Image: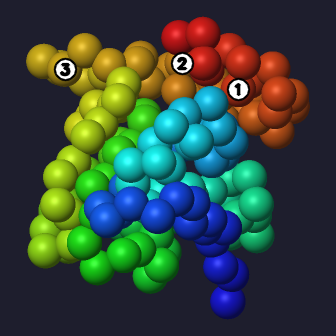
Amino acid sequence: MNDIWWQTYGEGNCHLVLLHGWGLNAEVWHCIREELGSHFTLHLVDLPGYGRSSGFGAMTLEEMTAQVAKNAPDQAIWLGWSLGGLVASQMALTHPERVQALVTVASSPCFSAREGWPGIKPEILGGFQQQLSDDFQRTVERFLAL
């Protein structure tokens, strides 16, 4: 059984779970960790399949959320960026008693464009899949530029 990487930092009375976006890891929060850690007990997470949480295969949003929930505090504020926002939102839907507050940054309930919804065009998202296996670093840089 694979475990996700989870680091607790700070000693505040309120728990704050920070979830990174696609193609990244918990290091994205490094620049604010010290400041937030003086006010909260931070939970820095590498989502399944990212960073130090490698060894996971492809999974649905629900499966990813279930993995994160295994290590989560009983009650916390959830802050998710992009993909992390989707996981945090799913956590609020499936475990509302454990979510004190939900904050999403540059996240969307529907990432892909479709009729009546402005998102990233499906052909662009499809192109990322092939490019990931060809040149991971360049693909992540291209994605972040969107």
Distance of label 3 from label 2 (alpha carbons):
16 Å
Per the image, the residue denoted by label 3 is 117
Which badge, 3 or 1, comes first in the chain's sequence? 3
Q: Quadrant of the N terminus?
A: bottom right
Q: Is residue 15 left or right of residue 6?
A: left
Marked residue nearer the N-terminal end (3 or 2): 3
Taking 144 as reference, is 65 left or right? left
Say left or right for 130 vs 21.
Answer: right
Task: Examine the rendered structure and indicate whether residue 17 appears above or below residue 24.
Answer: below
Disc 2 marks a residue whose amino acid type is Ile
The structure residue drawn at horizontal position 51% and vertical position 20%, both measured from the top left corner, is: 123
- Indicate the amino acid at tag 3: Trp
Residue that carries the numbered disc 1 in the rendered image:
140
Q: Residue at x 46, y 70 (%)?
A: 68
Q: Residue furthest top?
A: 145
Left or right relative to 95: residue 22: right
Q: Do labels 3 and 2 touch, CB within 8 Å? A: no
Reading the image, the residue beneath label 2 is 124
- Of labels 2 and 1, earlier in sequence is 2
